[in-house]
Amino acid sequence: MADRLPAHMREFASYLDGLLARLDQGAGWCGVFWQRDPEGMQACLDGREVPPWDVVEALLEDLGGMYGRATATAERERARALHAAALDAHDARPGAREDLADRLDVMLREQRYAAERHAGLARLLSAPAPGTDTDSLRTDLAWARDDHRRATARCGELRARIDELDRTAAPSSPGRDTAPAPARIPARAVPPAPAPADTPAAPRRRRRGSARFAGLDADQGAAPATAPRAPAPLAPDAAVRRTPRGARFAGAAEPAEAAAGTVQAVDEAAAAEVAGAVGRLARLRTEGRSGEAHALLVELVGWPAGRLPPLADALHRAGLGADWATLLWESAALPAERLVAAADALAAAGRDTDAQRMLWQGVARPAEQIGAAVLRLDEEGRHREARALLDACVRARPPQDAARCAAAGPRHLVPLLLEAARGVSEERHWDLVHALRVAGHAP
């Protein structure tokens, strides 16, 4: 079997075998991967599959923990080159595009599952019941977050490979809204959180099926060392295929240009700060300092809203598109008012998809908090922003969750919720009517 594999895939499998031989198979990320998906790991060692880059990156972090950061940094360049060549060889085989599309479909489901799990755990931690083991919940939350970050990275890697095949097959086909990063630079995948200092605990249950390659284990394992801080996103469902109306999110009647005029202008004067931040981030990624890179992303979330569009452009130009996805995730921790301002700034710059994603992730916080934020915005006369927040909530969350928003002020919020639901569909409107009645808020 191995003799029939493309040479570059055999070469990478041999490299991976040598890398694993230098590691403690039962410790760190290596131990976690073997516990979670031994079949996928063996397929990679046999050369039948090429692991996602985040797996290789994690193994290199193990290497750095055992032999020092300098060793891992020196090894990374060779690993990246061999990995890229193996992907090229894999994707040159007949039927590769269909295979990648199938894998992307599976990974998108994994991404959504991890996001929903993170959202549920975050809600449990926000108001724990008496006797709840909060330490265990925090451990599960950390794993759900790591699973989502890995799924996001893998979706990005798979999309880039599909884009590359499409460009090769049809060079004249039109591009996307945002230029994708070069497809053969797998380092753009989000690195995992730093490996635990001690041996990770074995998962309590085997995962349900497998997304392959040391699969994402939504049923927990050892916790990543970096504790989560932001509320989780709730991945959008079929609403992601809908084109927002009016002010791009709220379904308001005013045109997009009018909405853009109400938000903070893009901060073009911050070009030097943007360039400096992207340069620092690129250096941290190159040196394998993923913990510091993540801390920098968290810092950037707090920047003025007008800096976000040029920051997004600069990150994509630098091949750090996955870091932009992480930044959007972290933005879910922003206060609701700042969240809407940031989404407005992105929409004004033509980044509608990013703005939608930011709002969807932000409304995964407890529904009662969303309702309270809408009331504050309305009291301040910021009606469009209030409706943008409710629109995102109604689109992204199940009707029974959205109905809980009304608890902060039923008389005021019930009509607004129903108006937002009508902007989605008649079916969503009646589902919400039913959910409000069950919750004791009869329309």
Image: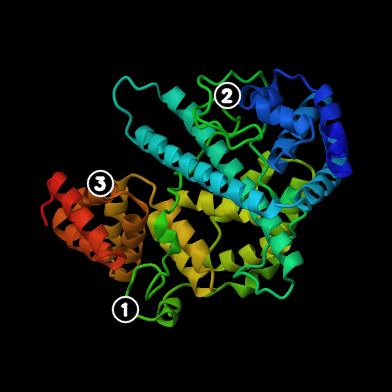
- Residue at left 70%, top 20%? 27
Say few, some or many: other residues with alpha carbon within 10 Å of mark 1 (under 14 / 14 to 19 / 20 or more).
few
- Determine whether the residue tagged by mark 1 lies in a helix, strand or loop: loop
How crowded is the residue under tag 2: few (<14 C-alpha within 10 Å), some, or many (20+)? Answer: many
Residue 71 in the image: x percent, y percent?
A: 87, 33
Quadrant of the snapshot with the N terminus: top right
Residue type, label 1: Ala
The x, y position of residue 423, in whole percent, is 29, 67
- Residue at 70% in and 41% down: 52
In this orientation, which residue lies closer to the viewer: 303 or 345?
A: 345
- Give the quadrant of the C terminus: bottom left
Looking at the rendered structure, the kind of residue marked 2 is Ala
Residue 105 numbered mark, or none: none
Instruction: Using the rendered image of the protein, determine whether residue 215 is visible from the camera's viewpoint.
Output: yes
The local secondary structure at tag 2 comes to: loop
Q: Disc 3 or disc 2, which is closer to the eye?
A: 3
Q: Give how far apart the Cα atoms at labels 1 and 2 are.
A: 49 Å
Residue 293: give x, y in percent of width and height: 68, 46
Q: Residue at x 58, y 37 (%)?
A: 211
Tag 3 near tag 1, CB within 8 Å: no
Snapshot quadrant of residue 428: bottom left
| Residue underneath mark 2 | 222
Q: Can you tell which mark lies on residue 400? A: 3
Between the C-alphas of marks 3 and 2, the distance is: 33 Å
Measuring 41% from the left and 37% from the top, which residue is drawn there? 122
Q: Is residue 428 left or right of residue 283?
A: left
Q: Secondary structure at mark 3?
A: helix
Q: Is residue 47 left or right of residue 435?
A: right
Give the left or right position of residue 195, taking residue 127 as reference: right
Residue 253's disc is: 1
Q: Nearer the viewer, residue 137 or 12?
A: 12
Does label 3 or label 2 sit earlier along the sequence? 2
